[in-house]
Amino acid sequence: MPTIANSTRPETAPIAKLLSLMEGSARFARESVHRASAEFGSTWGADFSAMLGNFYPSDAALLDAVKGYAAFVMDSMRRQKRFEQELCYPAKTYAEAAAEVYYNDDYMRRQYLPGLLLSHYLWPHHYQQIEYFKSYFLPWMQAQQVTEFAEVGVGTGIYSRLALQHRSDLRGVGFDISPLSLEFTAAHVGSFGFAARYQTRQQNIIEQPSEQRFRAVLCVEVLEHLEDPVALLKGLKQLCTSDGKLFVTAALNAAHADHIFLYRQPQEVWAQVEAAGLHMEHCFFANAYAPAKPGLPVPSALAMVLSPKV
Ligand SMILES: C[S@@+](CC[C@H](N)C(=O)[O-])C[C@H]1O[C@@H](n2cnc3c(N)ncnc32)[C@H](O)[C@@H]1O
């Protein structure tokens, strides 16, 4: 039976190329490709191949992404080790995180954005969160014939792109404070041929609320980046129509350069959701891996489908 590494099937060829580039500069990451392939199967293979083939069509671009992913993983592991000992994130203000990360051209292009994008496919809890979005939120948007959505904190743009890919009659608006995230997202969405259905806006919706309202609002892994996540949840509620729904996620116990609000338990997020006047309809929770020792914190993903309380 052909493996991904020696497959000549067009849909897995970009993954085979990725594996061969990892051989030279990120050998440790090959295992995560094989593990994800075994766990998530052909849908994962087709999705991941399409992203790699569209967005990183040349070997040089793919090699840069591999190097970015390797640097992102090493950086995250180092921060997580420190977190396991100190059980808190290093004190950092939002302004400091923004300068260090969101407005840092070199860090965003070389490490953060490619690393985050590949992590959506190679970290099991990240891909499970995508599966949850595809099985619980996109079908609701389709059933309700939602024609326009907003995403806040687009980062790599993967969730916006997945929504645009799901239906050709859907249009979207992506908000972010970082021009680098917006540029990356526009390129990502454009590489799938969806540019005409998507707009990007450099806007902090907390300080500068949008006049436009949307029936579907997405916000993936932004809450833990803020000093006051309730302010963002209130902003998201305001962006959503009263009959709409929101797909909002949070990363728990995950030390990254720009994670400043530490969530230890899902209950802490649910209390903030409630405080912002939102109702949780459904949620998904997954750990990144089993703890090496009982009691050791592990990164986890909490994804929620919310509706505004009226
Ligand atoms: C970890 S990324 C989010 C992941 C992203 N949704 C994805 O799927 O790849 C965090 C993003 O939030 C953005 N961000 C931080 N504070 C924000 C704010 N107040 N409003 C909008 N975006 C913000 C950052 O610039 C960055 O692009």
Image (cartoon, rainbow, N blue to C red):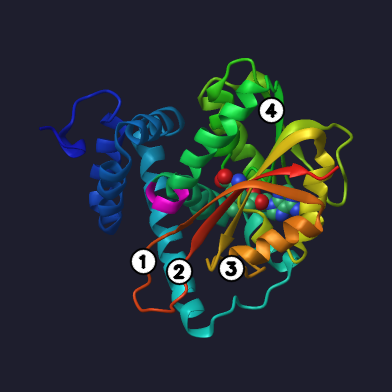
Of the two numbered discs 3 and 2 in the rendering, the one whose residue sits closer to the viewer: 3
What's the amino acid at mark 3? Gln
Q: Residues within 10 Å of mark 4 (few under 14, many from 20)?
A: many
| CA distance for labels 3 and 2 | 11 Å
Check whether the beta carbons of the residues at disc 2 and disc 1 lie within 8 A of each other. Answer: yes
Q: Earlier in the sequence, mark 1 or mark 4?
A: 4
Q: In this image, 191 relative to 98: left or right?
A: left
The stretch of residues the image draws in magenta is 122-126
Q: Is residue 244 above or below residue 88?
A: above
Q: Which residue is mark 4?
A: 172
Asked if residue 205 shows in the view, the reply is: no
Under circle 4, the secondary element is strand
Q: Which residue is mark 3?
A: 265
Under circle 2, the secondary element is loop
What's the amino acid at mark 2? Val
Q: Is residue 212 above or below residue 202?
A: above
